[in-house]
Amino acid sequence: MYQYEYLLYGGAAGPGKSYILRWAMVELLLNWFKRYGLTGVRVGLFCEDYPTLRDRQASRIKREFPLWLGKIKDSQAEGLAFHMAPGYGDGIIALRNLDDPAKYASSEFAAIGVDELTKNQRQTFDDLRFRKRWPGIEHSPFLTASNPGSIGHGWVKKLFVDRDFSGDDENFDPSSFLFIKALPKDNPYLPKSYWNTLHSLPPDMRKAMEEGNWNIFAGQAFREFSIQKHVVEQFGFKLEDCTKVMTFDWGYNDPGCCSWLAITPENQNGIIRVYVYRELYQREKKPKQWAEELALYTKIEDIEFMVLPHDCFSTDRGNRSIAKIFKQKLNTRIIRGHTLTKNARINRAAITHELLGEADDGIPYLLFKPNCYNTIRTLPELVYDENNPEDINRKGEDHAYDALSLGLLTIKEKFKLTSGGVKSQPIRPQKQNAWQPDEKGKIKAPDFWAEFKKKKKKSTTHYVKE
């Protein structure tokens, strides 16, 4: 098992993942001492923060590890660590937290173990794996145990569960990764009451906690998203019959994303839909490079407008703003999205939820072309903010979602949808206050699509492939 460089034992609740991880560190140290005579070897056992480290690992080590094996102590030289007894190689299990992974830049560990890897961003994984080296040890494994969910769910699932090494991960050796599915039955000491608790959970949560399902997990924001329902090859209208907009989320070190949305006329059932038919997802591109590339599309396609977030309108040290650069290059209107207004993020999440829902004909209002790979990949991996359960956690890979939700909110704010298409007409207050924020500035999601459902002149439906 330890011949793999990266190993994940993850999935369901209750199999003893943290237990296995700390005892794996002991086994590695004993093995290096017995086989190679290596003494004083240091391995690292990490948790996301100090309280978790203390509760999940340090306190358990004190109870579980026998006194003859060694002792846990906090020293100036090694910090908090478990020190193996001299007769067992003087090895050290350094107990560390990941509140700032950069502080371990000069550290060396013969092996690294991370408890609940999904609690961390991808950058933490990359920072740590370059710290695993030790004189005399050829193979330094990276071991981790984790439940599905949290901010790192997407990238952990991509590498370990889906074994998807596309994009920036193409240089990984797939044979160096191993995923072992963790199940409650792996732990023979679970009491019957724990099993009863698992069985009593709601169906979706039970699949995650009892079956270790990585597609459904606790805290998942857009659980209603389904590739089978939301990803389609054919649209209900020709693109030229739709009103098209572009929406953008800026990024340089992190990916930037531009999405193309097509708003249809009403179909024969009086339903209007939004199709996400193209995306551009890339990093380390300067605003001018983005503008030149996007300009190629606006020259050949009629785009009603492009919406940018507030940060694209700011200037840095006198430089031109991204909005100004885009305005000079692109053959379309540039407008500012409402990203700083009160409850803007909550409204964006609510609108995305509503459009992912099904219309009266059983088909969702919001549909995606298969070529929108990163949007399709990251949307179901987003989680709620722990401090604000109505908002999306910003530490996840939310670039495609930010672009999409900004576009959806702007469509609601700027356009009046009619049976003949979309007119560039601001929505006027209605007597029933349709589409208007309440006294707290929130838009109730169930009311959002009501305006779109109004019966208008019927349109002929055509099915084409782009």
Image: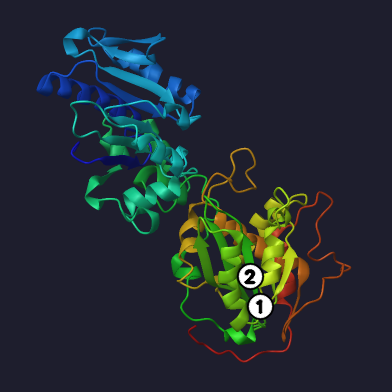
Q: Which of the 4 image quarters holds residue 105?
A: top left
Amino acid under label 1?
Ile
Front-most of 310 and 119?
310
Q: Give yes or no for contact between labels 2 and 1 (Cβ–Cβ under 8 Å).
A: yes
Image coordinates of residue 228 in percent, x first then y, are 44, 69
The residue at which mark 2 appears reads as 246
Q: Is residue 165 left or right of residue 118?
A: left
Dot 2: element: strand
**Could you tell me which residue is drawn at 36 percent across and 15 percent down?**
81
Check disc 1: other Cα within 10 Å, few if <14, some if 14-19, many if 20+.
many
Q: Is residue 358 left or right of residue 337?
A: left
**Could you tell me which residue is drawn at 20 percent across and 8 percent down?**
86
Dot 1: element: loop
Residue 291, relative to residue 203: is it above or below? below
Q: Is residue 450 left or right of residue 6?
A: right
Q: Is residue 359 visible?
A: no
Amino acid under label 2?
Met
**Could you tell me which residue is drawn at 49 percent across and 83 percent down?**
466
**Could you tell me which residue is drawn at 69 percent across and 75 percent down?**
332
Sequence-wise, which precedes: disc 2 or disc 1? 2
Q: Which of the 4 image quarters holds residue 237?
A: bottom right
Q: Which of the 4 image quarters holds residue 71?
A: top left
Check disc 2: other Cα within 10 Å, few if <14, some if 14-19, many if 20+.
many
The residue at which mark 1 appears reads as 303
Residue 75, relative to residue 119: is it above or below? above
Image coordinates of residue 72 in percent, x first then y, are 35, 11
